[in-house]
Amino acid sequence: MRPCLYMVIPCYNEEKVLPITSEIFLKKMKELVETGKVSEESKILFVNDGSRDRTWEIIKELSQKEKYIIGICQSRNRGHQNAVLAGLMEAKDKCDITISIDCDGQDDVNAMNHMVEEYINGAEIVYGVRSKRETDTFFKRFTAESFYKLLNAMGAEVIYNHADYRLVSSKVLKELANYKEVNLFLRGMFPLVGFKSTSVYYERAERIAGVSHYSLSKMLTLAFDGITSLSIKPLRIITGVGFIVALLSFIAALKFLFDKFFGYTVDGWASLVCILCMVSGIQMICMGILGEYVGKIYMEVKQRPRYIISERTYDNKEDEETE
Ligand code: UDP
Ligand code: MG
């Protein structure tokens, strides 16, 4: 049996790249179908993430021209992770396997052949892992690599140098659908779902056109979100810091007592202010971290929908059946 493949491709303000990369995806899809690796019913599913430019119009035009191309539109911009999730959840009942990939052409589509082979050999999740980052600037490489190291050090299990290019079977997606968290960090969630997984390696190219949507501040936010939505290690760390500060204060207090009893004058103002500032600074950081978790709880208890699909380029059969 040839598996039915859905490529899930999030697009946000990508009018410059889409006409180029859609050709690349289409060529790959045709090749996979013609070589008998995937079934005729396979599709390329573009997810428009509330773009402000012509992205959705381009997707609609493409879907009219090409039978392999379909699209869904989110009601507004919800960010990369939610766009990928919307696509995966849309695809999970329609296909056997999904491959999520960015639409900027940075990830090598040729790795898909290998991914599908690994699926046929029994893997349910196949992670696309970048073997080199030579095309990235030093800054991007440094920040991205620190990102993975920080996440793992903080207790969020992620695959090193794996972004959101991966094959996932519908079996895994059906389990993922039970993970209801609003604070999404897909990269960290698939290792949690489990199942047999493996990695394929590819070289990451430069963006074909347009600019990256991940600035340093967005990346820091993602790292912080990733850590706080997957692990409570930072809470433990602040307890540890509290103990260390308490110990240091105790040692300092001994010194001051010693000074007092042996007649030296206590260093008054300066030392006091230093300690005060340091401790209140640490307290504030700790409160901030605590607050972050409280905020996460707040978002989770509201259980708002994670994505809203406002338009499709096709009729959704499941919708009609349930109505
Ligand atoms: N993207 C999205 N919603 C957003 C931001 C980005 O769907 O709010 C998509 C974007 O179109 C691209 C992918 O997510 O397909 C990755 O974005 P980008 O290439 O800007 O990030 P980078 O590769 O630089 O990390
Ligand atoms: Mg990119």
Image (spheres, rainbow, N blue to C red):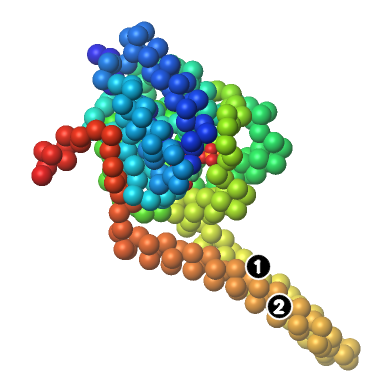
Which of the pair 306/283 is nearer the observer? 306
Pinpoint residue 7: horizontal percent, then vertical percent: 37, 28
* Residue sitting at x 36%, y 21%: 119
User: Which three-letter amino acid code belongs to the residue tagged 2?
Assistant: Cys
Label 2: few (<14), some (14–19) or many (≥20) C-alpha neighbours in 10 Å: few
* Disc ID at residue 277: 2
Quadrant including the C terminus: top left
Q: In the displayed structure, does residue 34 sit left or right of residue 258?
A: left
Q: Earlier in the sequence, mark 1 or mark 2?
A: 1
Above or below: residue 161 compared with residue 220? above
Residue 110 visible (yes or no)? yes
Mark 1, secondary structure of its residue: helix
**For the residues marked 1 and 2, what is the alpha-carbon distance in whole angstroms?**
16 Å
Above or below: residue 260 compared with residue 288? below
* Residue sitting at x 31%, y 26%: 64
User: Which three-letter amino acid code belongs to the residue tagged 1?
Assistant: Ile
Image quarter for residue 5?
top left
- The residue that label 1 is drawn on is 244
Image quarter for residue 193?
top left
Q: Is there CB contact under 8 Å for labels 1 and 2?
A: no
Residue 45 visible (yes or no)? no
